[in-house]
Image (cartoon, rainbow, N blue to C red):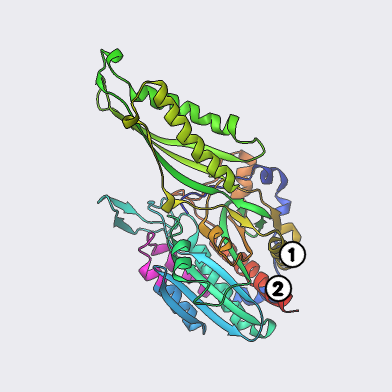
């Protein structure tokens, strides 16, 4: 998704070269089964990586996911909530477990230098030619979903219940989960008892997993502010009300929301990412436009941020003598709002225990919450209030990770044109972690 960037400085201190040993990862019954399936999964990954599609355009990707699930024996519904795919597998009486993966790519020209790099381009809404890349690991997510589905089908004798596989479109623009839920994901299909997902991490070595209890990802809001003024000649500023000056005052004043209005115990961010105004050196313009991103965990903090922005911008305009008809306009993009992802603590503990049992406790880390956003959180905010948990799947080549620790040089982040996960080990770990988690959820809930 377009908002993810992870950084774990504590891990860099805690993980040493010896702790990157993957010996604890091997030699389980499930590991042997996944290892046999890897060649086919790697081919699927490479296909998905080389054929990315942007949000709301995932037609071919959706068709491929539907075909893979049908081949495994799932009852498949396509084009649900856009290009969403829902696969249902009934396996006797028991709980309903939903596993979700996102499927859209990003408008990035890949610069990894890999021989399998994406070379796909498209024309965007502004008629610009842009590259497309799975720079957020959704190709890993999809491959892990199919790999998990395959293992759960293969080991049907080891669990009972209903498996619900969801391939979700448009995560990067915050629209996919909303669309699927609006169309009736939890009414047209069995309502899940638990919902799990994974996300590749660009800060954790492959072979390891990071778990989070409680808030894992943030509320995300996009806000536009139009600051009005009375323009004129730059040589006669006294005859104007300069919106550039008002904008400068506003940018600085907005920072006091974090530092002086919201409790220091409540994490939050107010960032002005764009400011545009004026056309020439000696012209004072009539308007300056700001674009902001807001981040928080607590929904009440989000409301506090937005209310403060409206109050501060209006107050600065009034102090400059602007009439009411020239008051600033604050527009919150409600259609792009993403709620925080809250990992249900009970479910998160079960997920952690399952993954530790499969991978070994040395390969399961406690990851901190981040200010990135993910629309996965919406699945836990429906009237049914189903518990959700998303865990981080390490994607960095262990040698590359250790080199970064030793040198202090930053690793390519998610959404970087140079992000290239160690896909073989990452997929293997993701399938094992998710399959074992699902099996345990079926069995624990049916005992």
Per the image, is 93 magenta? Answer: no
Per the image, is 56 magenta? Answer: yes
- Name the residue at 62% across, 55% down: 342
Looking at the rendering, the stretch of residues picked out in magenta corresponds to: 39-62
Q: Label 2: which residue?
A: 440
Question: Mark 2, residues whose alpha carbon is within 10 Å: few (<14), some, or many (≥20)?
Answer: some
Q: In this view, does 48 lie to the left or right of 228?
A: right
Image coords of residue 187 (percent x, y): 51, 74
- Name the residue at 57% across, 74% down: 191
Which quarter shows the C terminus? bottom right
Judge by depth and name the residue closer to the eye, 77 or 43: 77
Whichever of labels 1 and 2 marks the residue nearer the N terminus, that label is: 1
Judge by depth and name the residue closer to the eye, 181 or 310: 310
Residue 385 found in image quarter: bottom right
Residue 197 found in image quarter: bottom right
Question: Mark 1, residues whose alpha carbon is within 10 Å: few (<14), some, or many (≥20)?
Answer: some
């Amino acid at each position: 998704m377009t908002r993810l960037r992870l950084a774990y400085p504590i891990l860099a201190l805690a993980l040493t070269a010896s702790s990157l040993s993957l010996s604890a990862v091997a030699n389980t019954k499930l590991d042997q089964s996944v290892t046999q399936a890897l060649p086919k999964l790697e081919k699927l990954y490479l296909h998905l990586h080389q054929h990315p599609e942007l949000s709301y355009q995932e037609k071919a990707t959706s068709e491929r996911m539907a075909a893979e699930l049908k081949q495994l024996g799932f009852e498949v519904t396509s084009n649900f909530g856009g290009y969403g795919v829902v696969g249902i597998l009934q396996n006797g009486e028991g709980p309903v477990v939903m596993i979700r993966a996102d499927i859209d790519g990003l408008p990035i020209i890949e610069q990894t230098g890999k021989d399998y790099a994406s070379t796909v381009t498209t024309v965007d809404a502004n008629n610009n030619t842009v590259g497309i890349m799975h720079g957020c690991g959704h190709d890993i997510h999809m491959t892990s979903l199919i790999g998990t589905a395959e293992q759960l089908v293969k080991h049907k004798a080891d669990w009972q219940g209903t498996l619900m596989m969801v391939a979700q479109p448009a995560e990067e623009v915050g629209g996919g989960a909303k669309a699927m839920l609006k169309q009736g994901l939890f009414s047209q299909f069995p309502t899940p008892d638990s919902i799990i997902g994974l996300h590749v991490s660009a800060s954790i070595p492959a072979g390891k997993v990071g778990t989070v209890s409680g808030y894992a990802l943030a509320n995300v809001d996009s806000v536009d502010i139009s600051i009005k003024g009375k323009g004129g000649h730059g040589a006669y500023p006294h005859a104007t009300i300069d919106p550039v000056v008002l904008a400068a005052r506003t940018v600085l004043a907005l920072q006091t929301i974090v530092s002086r209005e919201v409790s220091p115990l409540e994490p939050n961010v107010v960032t002005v990412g764009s400011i545009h105004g004026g056309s020439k050196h000696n012209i004072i313009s009539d308007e300056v436009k700001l674009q902001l991103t807001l981040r928080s965990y607590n929904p009440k903090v989000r409301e506090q941020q937005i209310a403060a922005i409206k109050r501060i911008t209006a107050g600065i305009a009034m102090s400059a003598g602007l009439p009411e008809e020239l008051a600033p306009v604050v527009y919150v993009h409600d259609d792009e709002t993403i709620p925080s992802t809250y990992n249900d603590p009970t479910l998160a503990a079960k997920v952690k225990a399952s993954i530790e049992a499969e991978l070994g406790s040395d390969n399961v880390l406690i990851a901190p919450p981040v200010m990135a956003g993910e629309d996965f959180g919406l699945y836990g905010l429906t009237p049914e209030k189903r518990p959700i948990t998303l865990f981080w799947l390490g994607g960095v080549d262990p040698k590359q990770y250790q080199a970064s620790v030793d040198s202090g040089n930053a690793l390519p982040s998610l959404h970087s044109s140079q992000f290239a996960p160690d896909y073989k080990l990452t997929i293997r770990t993701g399938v094992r972690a998710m399959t074992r988690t699902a099996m345990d959820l079926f069995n624990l809930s049916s005992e």
